[in-house]
Each structure stands twice: as structure tokens, then as C-alpha cells.
Image (spheres, grey):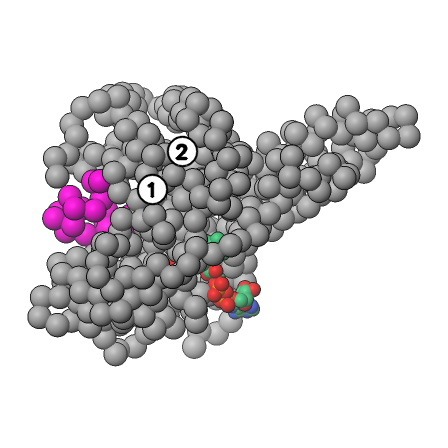
Amino acid sequence: MALRGGGRWARLGSALRGRSSGPRDGGDTPQHRDLRAALRKIIDKEINPFVDKWEEEGQFPAHKVFKTLGQAGFLGVDKPTEYGGMGLDFSYNIAVAEELGNIRCGGIPMAIGVQAGMATPALTRFGSDELKKQFLAPTIAGDFVACLGISEPGAGSDVANIKTTAVRKGDEYVINGGKMWITSGSQADWMCLLANTSEGPPHRNKSLICLPMNLPGIHVAKKIDKLGMRSSDTAQIFFEDVKVPSKNLIGEEGKGFTYQMLQFQEERLWGVATVLTPLETIIQETIDYTRQRKVFDQSVLHNQTVHFRLAELATEVELLRSLLHRAVALYVEGNDVTKYASMAKLKAGRLAREVTDSCLQFWGGMGFTSEVLVSRFYRDLRLMSIGGGTDETMLSIICKYMEILPSK
Ligand SMILES: Cc1cc2nc3c(=O)[nH]c(=O)nc-3n(C[C@H](O)[C@H](O)[C@H](O)COP(=O)(O)OP(=O)(O)OC[C@H]3O[C@@H](n4cnc5c(N)ncnc54)[C@H](O)[C@@H]3O)c2cc1C
């Protein structure tokens, strides 16, 4: 496939790469702000006007939306230029994630996250040039929709316990098993699949494989009906003797578990970044609503219990942003930030539930309707405590890194 060498996205990327960094504001330099402003225009014109319709339909058109974002360069800001990316550092991807929080639902930013920051980091870092041309370049361009296949019906938190196998036969892998909860699974062109490629110990017998989703033996069993994230399709998928070329292996055989743990760092930081803006939006919309809503002859906001709570929650969001940007800065310098990424994800999950719960209450009956954003985010942002690892998984990782318990 021909890689694109020009266009608006490339000019934006090279303009940003070439400029010296100015003062930072919450992790953002003027270059980050330029990138965010360009993305905001697309969100306001191409995405937000259609969100209510897509939420109602239970699916957004991923190919159409990703093509728009891909053409503008937003699916590969931190990916290498030779595969169509902008070649910027990871902090720009985080700026994109924060800006995507202006989309008026959680489902679309999550699916974009899978495409730009969850299914592709290991391929970018460890994949062969041929694989990157075949899968990464069209994913960055928005021609392919990507999904990430880790979880299974019997293994979510316990990733090491997955049962899907990829058995090497000649120059092919034969795949059997199934995956559960796969974001964009019913629209995806390829999956970054984690499978057992040997009988060895569970942390050394797994591999990541680029799996085209149009191969015989792949069955998308069902689109899962969900509490929230309704515009993002979530699928259960089965594999029955699916044959894939062995050259589709990402990096080395047996290193898949380690690659996935590394890949999780970006996924978790991205997830944290996408909730910051919705939380601020909900707090602001709650301030606006409660200011004009009169109860017992005074505005709801006038009650100290209401405005103190909102001020407290806004403070917590700022603290979360500081932790996120600390972790991102360390990550950009090449450090292992598993502990900080896990802390940030834990806090983001908890805070998302607190903010949406408190704010929904301040809206009274209106908060219980589908007409207000707070009720949508009350449902959608609960996923922050589940997807990409639950709060309890984050706590286990933090304990491990703090050496709270003796290692087994
Ligand atoms: C909308 C949605 C989209 C998703 N997208 C994807 C995707 O694209 N790709 C993908 O691979 N997966 C995806 N997932 C799966 C997600 O990552 C898993 O749901 C998550 O990892 C939890 O796994 P589980 O659902 O099997 O829960 P389980 O592992 O069954 O956990 C059940 C409960 O046990 C708790 N628990 C676990 N360990 C401990 C412990 N040590 N101590 C105490 N309690 C514990 C958990 O916190 C949880 O409360 C998605 C899930 C959802 C809901």
C-alpha cells in the first residue's frame, strides 16, 4: 500500500515538530494547544452533531469517522512518519485524548482510543516493517478499523489465564477459541490478538498476532447490549481453525504477555486523559443548571453543600490531571510508569463515579432523563473502573510496585 507523503496532516505534524516548546499549561505547550484546536473543529463539525443519533442506533460508523480523523492525522500523532504518523511524542497523543473528551459521549473516544492507542503500540514498537505497512499504515490513515482481542469469557482481570490458542503449523498459525467484550469488534478489519502459542508458563507462552477479521472461521457471534458506551459496538467473537500466516506475529513468539503489559500503560494513560474533559464539562453544566434552578426561592447552587461539593470535585479533577501529566512526562523520557498509570487509572475510575453521581443528584428529576449529558456520562464513565483493568486490578499492580506484599 502506498504511504501518503503529503497533505494537511503532514504539514501540521512537521510544523509542530519544528517548533521550540513554549510555556506549559496543564501539560500543554502552545503546540499541543494548536493540535487540540484543529481537532476541536472536526469534533464540532463531523462528530458532535451526530452523537445522539449514533447513541440511539447503538453504533457509530467507525470507518467514516476514522477516515475523517485519519485524513487529518489524528490517528497517529505519535506514530512514525514512515507509516503515515506525525512523529510527535506520546504527550501529543494524550493532548488528543483530552480533546476527544469534548465528544458528547464516552463510546466514540473509547473506540478512537482502541484505534490510536490500544491496538497499535506493540505493533509500532515490535512489529516488522512488512506488518506495519500492512496493518499500521492503513489504521493510521483511517482506512482500517482496529480492535484489541485480549479478554475472553473466562479471563478478564486474569489475562494470563486466556484459553485461545494459536498453534504453529508450517508457515501458519491455526487459531481456536474466542474473545469477549471486543470494542469495534463487529466493524473491525483486523484484531491485535493475544493467544497462547505454546504450553509453557502463562507469562511466557503468549504472543500478539495481527489477525485480519475477514478470514474463514471468524464468527462475530453477537453485538453486546450495554448499560453505557452505547454508540461503541462491543462484540463477542469465536475462532474456529482460523489460519493466519506466521509472519503476522508481532515481535517474538512467547513475548505477547510482556508486550501487552507494556501496551496497557498507553491504554490506561489514554483512558485517564479522555475522562478529564467530560468531568469538567459535567461540573460546569451542573454549575450553570443549578445557578438558574430555583428551589425554596433561591438557586440550588446557592446552598453551600452544593457549591462546596462542586469546588471540591473540580479540585480533584485538577489533581488527577497533574498525576496524569507527571506520568506522561516520565513515560516520554522512557521510564516504566506502570505504577503511576495504574494510580491515575484507579483515581480516574473512582472520580468519574463520584463526579457523575454527585452532579446527577444536583439536577434532581432532570438528571434522571436522557435529555441531559450528565445521565449519559453517569452511565458511560463507569467503564473507567472496568475496561483496561478494573479498580481492583489497579490496586493489585500498585501493591506489587510498592512491594506491599512479599512476592510469590
Ligand atoms: C464496554 C467494554 C469494552 C471493552 N473493550 C475491550 C476490548 O476492546 N478488548 C478487550 O480485550 N477487552 C475489553 N473489555 C474487557 C475489560 O477489559 C474487562 O471487562 C475487564 O478487564 C474485567 O474483566 P472481567 O469483565 O472478566 O471481570 P472479572 O475478571 O470477572 O472481575 C470480576 C470482579 O472481580 C474483581 N477482581 C478481580 N481481581 C480481584 C482481586 N485481586 N481482588 C478483588 N477483586 C478482584 C474485579 O475487580 C471485578 O469487580 C471491555 C469491557 C467492556 C465492558
Image location of residue 396, percent across then percent down:
50, 65
Residue placed under numbered mark 2 in the picture? 96
Image location of residue 157, percent across then percent down:
46, 65
The residue drawn where x is 22% and y is 22% is: 7
Image location of residue 161, percent across then percent down:
38, 73
Location of residue 148 with respect to 294 vertically, above or below: below
Residue type at tag 2 = Val
The circle on residue 335 is none
On screen, residue 276 versus residue 191, left or right, reads: right
Evaluate if marks 2 and 1 touch, with contact meaning CB atoms under 8 Å apart.
yes
Magenta-highlighted residues: 120-138
On screen, residue 138 versus residue 109, left or right, reads: left
On screen, residue 129 versus residue 55, left or right, reads: left
Label 1: which secondary element: helix
Is residue 203 something that shows in the picture?
no
Residue placed under numbered mark 1 in the picture? 116
